[in-house]
Image (cartoon, rainbow, N blue to C red):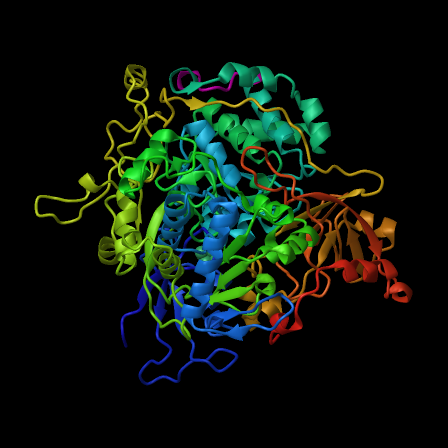
Amino acid sequence: MSEPIKTLCPYCGVGCGLEVSPPAQSGKATNRDSDGNPLWQVRGDRAHPSSKGKVCVKGGTVAESLDKNRLKYPMMRDSLDREFQRVSWDEALDKITQQMQQTIQTQGADGICMYGSGQFQTEDYYIAQKLLKGCLGTNNFDANSRLCMSSAVSGYIQSFGSDGPPSCYDDLELTDCAFLIGTNTAECHPIVYNRLRMHHKKNRKVKMIVVDPRQTKTAKDADLHLAIKPGTDMELLNGIAHLLLRWGELDTLFIDECTQGFGDFARIIQDYPPELVARRCGIRIDHLEEAARYWAESENVLSLWSMGVNQSSEGTAKVRTIINLHLMTGNIGRPGAGPFSLTGQPNAMGGREAGGLCHILPGYRVVKNADHRRELEQVWDLSPGSINPVPGRDAWSMITGLETGDVGVLWVAATNPAVSMPDLVRTKKALLRSPFTIVQDAYYPMETASFAHVVLPAAQWGEKTGTMTNSERVVTLCPQFRPAPGVAKPDWEIFAEVGRRLGFTKEFDFANSAEVYQEFVQLTKDRPCDMSGLSHGRLRQQGSIQWPCPLEEVEDVNGIALSCSTERNINSESEEAKGLFSNLFRNKDETPEPKRLYTDGRFNTADGRAKFSAFHAKGLAEPIDPSYPFVLTTGRLYEHWHTMTRTGRIDKIMKKQPRPFMEIHPRDAHKLGIEEGARVEVRSRRGLSTFPARITEAIVPGTVFVPMHWGALWTDDGEANLLTHPESCPISLEPELKACAVNLTPVRLENNHNSDREEFQSQLPSLSEKTMSVKR
Ligand code: SF4
């Protein structure tokens, strides 16, 4: 039997190591998927530092999706009401190049937009940045991380001077108190959660606080579940800070020597006394006090959060206020303590490193910084001023740009905005207006392909070689282990080929992805995310490695790769920054290691100090009112992944979660005459969907929950994002996908053919039957 191939799970940001073996093993019958295709064997990699051999149902079944409904050939059509015709790569790329040149001539480079994905490998991300931001001079590249992690990115940048989660997974087993807010970790990041749950179970003194309007699987394990009303997170966070200040539970040495701005924050939190906070949040005062007491009495507090915090019109404010709690108590930069955002996509972190959002550039640089632009222009050999100093279009403004006619070419790769964007009626109508849309994906059909003029077949996980970075900054090489189907190509190769056809021959002269990676990591040298010591060869030889990993740290006298360093990169060389922290160098006697950032109390700001923020609570962008009296919240399920492009094709998963549903509290169900399993029309100001009711006390009265996974391919009338709105955080531009106001109407048998619903559905953009049929 051949040695299994080590790789990374392609689903979520936990980043579990996998071992993959070929379908045919000598002496054994070949396993097959439900379509009869030979099935690759997948198991957890015990040697992987992040997951230690564990996988969840998604990772364990991922191979079953590899041969289902694959897009094998490029296809084109003149207009959306025509059928696709199979074409050659040359024909497709000629058409794309011609369309891009025409758009540049008539609208400028800013008429071109690319919407990418945390499913990309870092090499895909990097080449896309070089093409758009470097060669074409438009920053109109955004990724689905905009809907996921951009609030965490802006929170880290504003508080610490740089992106990058400061903690690591070992902290899950070293903390005395885990503070989980806006994260159903048990279902959405299950392997991370298993580590925390085991630690919590074994150590009675370890506390777990869960803040969530739903009693999720995570909340059921908590010592304290704060079922706050949706949208009151800021009150709660400021309320905890108020009590810590009132009790004098502060790390004054840390505040004095390592931070700035505490005074303004201290003034703001005066306005959040416990009586007021408890009332607004809908929780008991003693529960609020208990939460604050856990913060005060614990040696090391670890905060975990994900979409419940990020997908909010106050997303950045929430992230920064979580960080405030860590700064005021000195809970950062040491084992078991720190603010830790859990990333959604498998390589959202790699995207951040490679500059994969419209306001950032490779190597944790930002578009608005003239030095950062100049550094890249020099490395990319571009004339000064080539990189546009203005951030490009974020995901939602690509949609509005289609509405106004300012977007001439929309290129969507490895993501599915016709399901995942907010306000889907508006989104789909805008997509229908697109002059030219390219959809590049591994699967067909998928919802967004219905809006494409050209579809390009992309090689996916296991069919190309590249790297991915998980939530704790661990980089793993994901080698190709099977051929891509048909003529599918890696995303980076497609971008590079278009670049060459547009005249940038030398800029995209790469023989393979290892060369791409080599160019990219050199750009991270002396940056906070320094990976200049990494290469495909080293990762293949040594396994997964955490950054920072600077070049000079990794070679001994014989040039043999050794280990990385924790030497922090600090942007400022000011005397003040150098003179600070003499009392606070926490790790001065310890062996340097890269697990945690900011172990020396020095941050990447100009003066080396972390910044407190001072935000008042604003609440939901769309509060309830008499016409729309319920808050709808959306979320993920353990079994499914995002828009089901893979998991919808795996029988085992579809048997467990075949259709969407709506959770409602018994009190509300009784009041509205809704019975278990009965269909309920859920209507917002933007749209209408229908779900069978699941009556449960696990959700607070006044709030209903629906999963976000199902798109038009998998459900006739249960799309969650037909209801949500696009109002977003003004700093991170992340939409508030987590909450909107709705009303509920039980569907009676006699009005099953409700004329309202039929009228609404008749307004939905019609999709070609030819591009939407799928074997279910
Ligand atoms: Fe994959 Fe995430 Fe499950 Fe790990 S927890 S196996 S990375 S989906």
Q: Quadrant of residue 502?
A: bottom left
At a point 46% along the width and 71% down the height, the residue shown is 66
Q: Is residue 253 magenta?
A: yes
Image quarter hosting the C terminus: bottom right
Residue 769, how many percent across, how many down? 66, 72
The segment highlighted magenta reads 246-254
Q: Quadrant of residue 138?
A: top left
Residue 595, how many percent across, how many down? 33, 40
Query: Residue 147, can we see it?
Result: yes
| Residue 64 relative to residue 556: left or right | right
Point out the residue furthest to the front here: 105
Q: Is residue 602 magenta?
A: no
Q: Nearer the viewer, residue 36 or 136?
A: 136
Point out the residue furthest to the left here: 558
Number of marks in the rendered image:
0
Residue 513, how many percent across, how many down? 30, 58
Vertical position of residue 152 compared to residue 483: above or below: above
